Amino acid sequence: MRLSFSFSPVTLVFGMSLLVAMFCLIPPLYLFIRVSDDWSHARDIVLASGSVTIILETFALVLVTTFFATCVGLTCAWLTEYTDFPYPTIFRLLFALPLAVPTYVGAIVMISLFSPVGFVNGLLSVFGLGQFPLIYGFWGSVFVLTLFTYPYVYLIIRPALLGIDRGLLENSRLLGRSGWYTFRHIILPLLRNALGSSGLLVALYVLADFGSVSLLRFNTLTMLIFIEYDGALDRVAASATSILLMAFAVVLVIGMFRFRGNEARGGLRSSRRAYRVRLGVWQIPAGVFSLLIIAFTLVAPVVTLLSWLIGDANFTSMVISIIHPLFGNILVGAVAAIVTTMLALPIAHITVRNKGVFLTRPIEILAYSGYALPGIVVGLALVSFGLQFDVLYQSVALLIIAYALLFLPQALNAEKPVLINIRPALQEAAASLGKNRMQVFRQITLPLMSRGLLASFALVFLTTLKELPATVLLSPIGFESLALRIWMGANEGFFADAALPSLLLILSSGVALYLAERNLFRLT
């Protein structure tokens, strides 16, 4: 007797989505298995006085940086979209570009400028002035992380501001309400969802940051994990701290979703009515604020790195030596972006088209767990996972798996909006003309999703290029990337050696950022 099995396309898509979602459980499961061997030892590590201090300092860094980054990003978006600020088109681009500068590159530049022997203090001493406050420690970390994470807020707030019905704001003004009243009671409530999303991104980025805080000599949980992993044979300590970091991230995600609540409705409609606030005498402070932001985030990094590069006598040999890391970085980043974009497709499809099905919500939650998995946690978990499989350990494939786990939520966020905008009637019409599901997907759905897929690829490629902790822990022997080159040069104090890879990384990230911002903005 011949047995035959048939699966409907919907079942197949659900099966693929479930496999991808279950794969996201690997890092937390391996960490819990590792710690379960000695719970009492893990508890003692977490509750040690030194660990508690670092936990509190990490929490303070996340809270303060998120607050300042939100203030800066919201101000930049408001200036370009809601005021008569000059040259808004140019400033829209300039305010987004700092996202292409990794925070650890920003830290290198700020140390060279503001350290006790840096350029700024040298200039102040010439004029007999006192020294600039030290860039190291808590406030230096807040300063650097705020400067290079505010674009996350800006890029999310800007389209949200454009979506607000300007008629509401005009009516408020006609009723004699002040600009501050309108901002507090109309604009801010309508931005609650966008503020929650952008604040969450900044908070999770700061929580997972490793490169900049280590260079700025500020101890955080990521630093503690790396020290425990790199400097001791006791891996239970690193695993226990990783679980703590992951729990912290989960609390942030839950807290931000509660803060967002239900998205405000009724005011989010497109309107052509031009609502502009006249800055008047405030145009000068606004201009100074904007120019300082651009000077610190774009001019200072590029000029400093170029000066180091031009002053290096071994420029030719440096260019030759950087070719291999550059192409390795681009190749691995492109493969990771393609893989992650493809893995996100079935999940995006079921979360948009099959919302009422029982498994949809759990699959979506698991897929978004990458938000709560800092790079160093994923790296540590996959090191343990790779040790069980010789073919995976110390391989590029394991590195790509880590990138896919970390950046799957970004791919989903790019693909879901375009799927929502595709009317099911188009697919139903194609099916009524005799097209099967695969033909409908290939000839109708996929072309209409091209912009979202390109945005997904660009976003994942951008973050892959800049990812440091997972790359440090999982890179195979002999593998080189721009991030690793920068880290090794900066860690050894040879900042000039980091100049060329930093510039190339900024350039590559800038191209990816342009593609992502252009396509995402058109989608929203």
Image (cartoon, grey):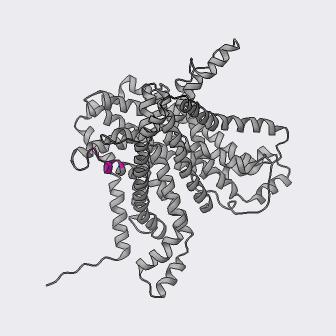
Does 471 sit above or below residue 434?
Answer: above
Residue sticking out furthest to the top: 128
Specify the quadrant that holds the C terminus. Answer: bottom right
> Looking at this rendering, what residue extends furthest in the bottom direction?
433
Quadrant location, the N terminus: bottom left
* Residue at left offset 47%, top offset 58%: 412
Horizontal relation, residue 375 to residue 445: left or right: left
Residue plotted at (61% across, 22% down): 119
Does the magenta segment cover residue 201?
A: no
Magenta extent? 392-399
Residue nearer the viewer, 225 or 34: 225
**Of 276 and 484, the residue lying toward us:** 484
Q: Position of residue 110 (x, y in %)?
A: 57, 28
Position of 57 with respect to 339 (left or right) is: right
Q: Is residue 322 above or below residue 232?
A: below
Percent across and percent down for residue 176 are 86, 50
Q: Is residue 264 above or below residue 442?
A: above
Where is residue 341 drawn, in percent x and y?
A: 44, 59
Residue 102 appears in view: yes
Residue at image coords 61%, 50%: 155
Figure quadrant of residue 249: top left
Give the mark count.
Answer: 0
From this viewpoint, is residue 56 visible?
no
| Quadrant hosting residue 121 | top right
Does the magenta run of residues contain 393? yes
Residue 222 screen position, x and y as percent: 41, 34
